[in-house]
Amino acid sequence: SEMATSMAASGSNLNFGEVGCRGLGYRQASLVSSLKFNKCIWNEISWSHRITKCVGINRYDIAISPIDVKFKPVKVVNAICSTDGSTKYFDFAVIGSGVAGLCYALEVAKHGTVAVITKAEPHECNTNYAQGGVSAVLCPSDSVESHMHDTIVAGAYLCDEETVRVVCTEGPDRVKELIAMGASFDHSEDGNLHLAREGGHSHHRIVHAADMTGREIERALLDAVIKDPNIFVFEHHFAIDLLTSQDGSDTVCHGVDTLNTETWEVVRFLSKVTLLASGGAGHIYPSTTNPLVATGDGMAIAHRAQAVISNMEFVQFHPTALAEEGLPVKPRKPRENAFLITEAVRGDGGILYNLSMERFMPLYDERAELAPRDVVARSIDDQLKRRNEKYVLLDISHKPREKILSHFPNIASECLQHGLDITREPIPVVPAAHYMCGGVRAGLDGETNVRGLYVAGEVACTGLHGANRLASNSLLEALVFARRAVQPSIDHMKGSRLDISASNCWSRPVVPMSLGGDVLGKILRKTREIRKELQLIMWQYVGIVRSTTRLETAEDRIAKLEAKWEKYLFEQGWEPTMVALEVCEVRNLFCCAKLVVSSALSRQESRGLHFTTDFPYLEESKRLPTIIFPCLAANSTWSSRQLHQQYTC
């Protein structure tokens, strides 16, 4: 079971809420005055200090085509690997190969050996699919204060002000470092960077590479990683669980168990420091702009390792994903992920119409198409439900053809493959799950309540996004926090040592070869069915517009579906220590889905991305981040438990 509670956000000082009980193993909160924990008073410490000093003491209480990059093969060096090859020893382990993981790896590699552990190919990450750009104050008429204001307004005033100031202040330097590293961004005719404007921004401040910014950043970073002799990349290694121990009241991270999905071998990585930069959990929903690898693995393994989770109810649905039903030429088979139509199309003058070619955004918000994403997504959702239609239209064809093709070449190419010329016709669009504003709660240096574990990127909840992410702030946050985590990681690494014999302290996961091909085939077919059922529940009951009844229905159905799946697995001979990619992914999807539902039930107001018909208004007294504390419950489900037992230092 878990504990969900709330904390008041006033600047960077937050208050805890009282804990109440609800439902299937999760807990909900109501608000009271501050509570004392371990001689700390929560409303007297900032977001950044809370993590290391206090959190965790309560645990006992309860199609973009791939980048054309020739990636170096995995390097194995005897000096850092055990003789049997099944355990590898590094100073730093980085889980994830997007912008956060690679930026961090390049910096810490100056001080030690680094393992970059990635689920698929290194470029297959959310960064690679990011179209819009990086927001940063690079124009003399813009200001840090203005960027902060836009971020906080978009975040429905739930953002942590100290975090926002740090990110907006340090962002320009991080962008300049990318350029120095070789990232190529678009420039205007005057030779200066071309700065775009997107929804929610009051100024032009989006640095971009046409509509393929993430791909360009990933290319530059991978080029640098290839050349670094201290960085070793392990492709097709799926992170199963973090390796943790108890040291008094502290949980300590020692590395991670992985499954090599090409050889079906379990590989153990022991490290002095671990950075979790594994991206989001878009595939808890049936339609998402995220790549297929985004199954919430990092959030789930951190949760099982006793990390504190925050703000999981705030799931951002991008308002404009390509609607295949509206294309003149339908795709031969459904995409694994929805194709994103970047925010910059609306920022560049794109207009939203319903199928009667009636412009509707001015009816919902005075900012019209430039309103923040949560407003636009709900407006589209309302139009679709009122008119019983499947998609709306986004029209940029009134702009000069040359401008459209130069700014949005990737979108134009994708649409043209399906018979649609965006310079002449509107684009059919529909909302799709896009970004998790919640995640593993992190301080200003990316630290968590688990010693030796740092987080950066979408897997983290830093306080920047609040209740809704401002467009193009995601790559910015990843850059800033990846860099901020570097020095404390180096300090921790220098004060730690690797105990080679420690590898035997945890039992090893096992691959299910003993079950035989027929049984394993049946398990995988059933698991795929369960995955689709879970995604459908989340879309129907935990979507853009919610209600208490629907959330409670989701909670009940998810619990029953998970119990049904686990019963089937174990009847087929599956053991709790067994691992297979698709089974472990669904294990993580269940974990994340339950975190989202539990968090949503605890928020009895509508704020940002969380809109509920039972509490349709924003309430100042409830301006509180949602916190889920881990509890070591014996009756938790398979998705909520580590496969191994923690050992005590």
Image (cartoon, rainbow, N blue to C red):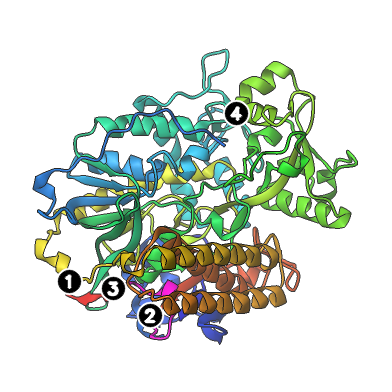
User: What residue is pinned by disc 1?
Assistant: 505
Q: Which mark is residue 268?
A: none
Q: Find out whether the residues at labels 4 and 2 contact each other: C-beta distance under 8 Å.
A: no
Mark 1 vs mark 4, CA separation in Å = 50 Å
**How far apart in space, not on screen, are marks 3 and 1 (Cα)?**
9 Å
Q: Nearer the viewer, residue 20 or 119?
A: 119
Q: Residue at x 48, y 38 (%)?
A: 128
Amino acid type, residue under disc 1 in the picture = Cys
Please tell me which residue is depicted at 75% across the width and 44% down the height of the picture: 325
Q: Position of residue 234 (x, y in %)?
A: 29, 45
The answer to whether any part of residue 310 appears in the image is no
Q: Nearer the viewer, mark 3 or mark 2?
A: 3
Location of residue 446 (image quadrant)? bottom left
Question: What's the mark number on residue 58?
Answer: 2
The spot of residue 370 in percent (x, y) is: 71, 40
Horizontal arrangement in the rendering, residue 284 relative to residue 70 (left or right): right
- State the extent of the magenta-drawn residues as a range: 631-644
Q: Could you say which disc has been placed on residue 410 in the image?
A: 4
- Observer-nearest of 310 and 39: 310
Q: Amino acid at mark 4?
A: Asn
Residue at mark 3: 644
